[in-house]
Amino acid sequence: MGEPIEIVLNGQRRRLDGVSPAMTLLDWLRGPARLTGTKEGCAEGDCGACTVLVDRLPVNACLALVGQMHGRAIHTVEGLRSADGTPHPVQRALAESDGTQCGYCTPGIVMSAVAFACGGEPPTPELIHDALAGNLCRCTGYRPIVEAVTRCAQSSGPWPMAPTIAIDTGSRTFDGATVLHAPRTLSELLQLRAAYPDAWLLAGGTDLGVRISHDREVPRRIIHVGGVPELTMLAEHPDRIEIGAAATYRQCLPAMANRAKPFAEMIRRLGSRQIRSMGTMGGNIGTASPIGDSPPVLLALGATLHVASIRGRRAIALDDFFLGYRRTALAADEIIVSIDMPLPAADETFDVDKVSKRRDQDISAVLGAYRLRVIDGVVRSARLAYGGMAATPARARHAEAALIDAPWNAATIERAVAALVNDFKPLDDWRASADYRLMVAGNLLRRLHMRSTGVAVELDAL
């Protein structure tokens, strides 16, 4: 017999009897909970109409599963009212600034704005853009929305805290059409993986959640790894960062911003704050998508994966992890525990470029990542990695060979660009043609050289 899912919803403890743990939080809110202020727009985590706050962080309710929410505090737009029924200051500001028209997207915008206004960040245009990047509005201009958020962030104090309600968050098994296991120790997780090698491994759910929310798949069994400390840790060392496979992008971002800034800039474009609150680097690697944005960067840096099963632990260089389209070197009973990410040295060039149809939270047509050491004008080492160019994220080894021990000049870059045709045979799809992808990959190498010599910086300033 399964155990009950318990949450704190708008300050009230709720027990979710008879609810499938694989139901999306959005479906539960709009269905059994009868809280219809939260809207469904895209069911893919793109539009932000379903934004709610989970432990004060913005999250796409269309991607979050009810079983993931056990023990967590959830706020919806209905929960923003004060005891006397007056609206939240963000709601008043949006109304007064004419920041809403049809109103469909407004609840999600309100929740993102509340998270930002009460989060203590300075209301700079860049940070407000980042806070609202996960919310699409199809009929209002964004100017009055930004004005309302700016005003609230400048005047808002801390959000009144609801009384603490403790819920036991020990290991759980939730039953329904889907069985969801929520282990709290690595040993228990490895035992479950050995017993159920075909179960879905769920970390944040920003990928697997789409299969449930949009594609309406019903998995038989899920193992949720987000409660295992070894998988949620992050440790900084002098020359590397160790990242738990279930550590969220939000958790990783400060360390990246301080020590690998180009990676941090890519993460901000990879997904909105809603996605970064849930998405994990281990999940991005484990799904083995050819257009995952983290793997090319980690390949360029020379990352190593630490994996485990009940048979023991081993390390796999990321270079050896991807075997083919959606195929990896991970055994059926193994899980990724952590990622060991080397940091670029002070005398190395490290950069990342993402090319996509839309700047924010769009799937890449091409992503390039580069780590080079140039000494006295000669390239002594080079790691070039791309996403979107093959069936897996991959190194451009012929282009690397064209660079190493050659002068760091335009002629050498052209030889490396020409060598890319021996590294990749891209496919045509609706995001980009094969010819376009090869052209972009080459142009990104040219841009890298121009940046290193200051030319690109000067052009950007024009």
Image (cartoon, helix red, strand yellow):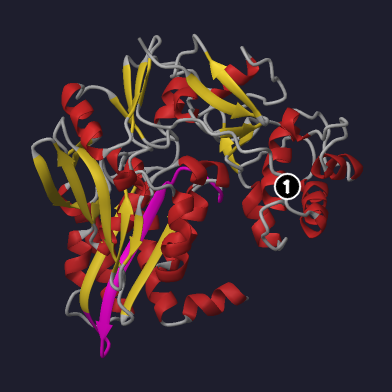
On whether residue 373 falls in the magenta region, the answer is yes
On whether residue 94 falls in the magenta region, the answer is no
Query: Which residue is outermost to the bottom?
Result: 376
In the rendered image, which quarter contains the N terminus? Answer: top left
Residue linked to disc 1: 159
**Residue 154: x %, y % from top left:** 80, 59
| Viewer-side residue, 107 vs 327 | 107
Quadrant in which residue 344 is drawn: bottom left
| Viewer-side residue, 175 vs 124 | 175
In the rendered image, which quarter contains the C terminus? Answer: bottom right
Q: Measuring 31% from the left and 42% from the top, which residue is drawn there? A: 290
**Residue 406: x %, y % from top left:** 20, 80
Q: Measuring 47% from the left and 40% from the top, which residue is drawn there? A: 278
Q: Which region shows up in magenta?
A: 359-379
Q: Is residue 12 visible?
A: yes
| Viewer-side residue, 183 vs 345 | 183
Q: Measuring 35% from the left and 66% from the top, which residue is drawn there? A: 445
Q: Is residue 245 visible?
A: no
**Residue 143: x %, y % from top left:** 80, 50
Q: Is residue 65 left or right of residue 378?
A: right
Quadrant in which residue 384 is drawn: bottom left
Query: Which residue is outermost to the left?
Result: 311
Question: SS for tag 1?
Answer: loop
Q: Is residue 360 above or below residue 241?
A: above
Q: Is residue 421 left or right of residue 429?
A: left
| Three-letter amino acid code of the residue under disc 1 | Trp
**Residue 56: x %, y % from top left:** 61, 43
Q: Is residue 453 above or below residue 158?
A: below
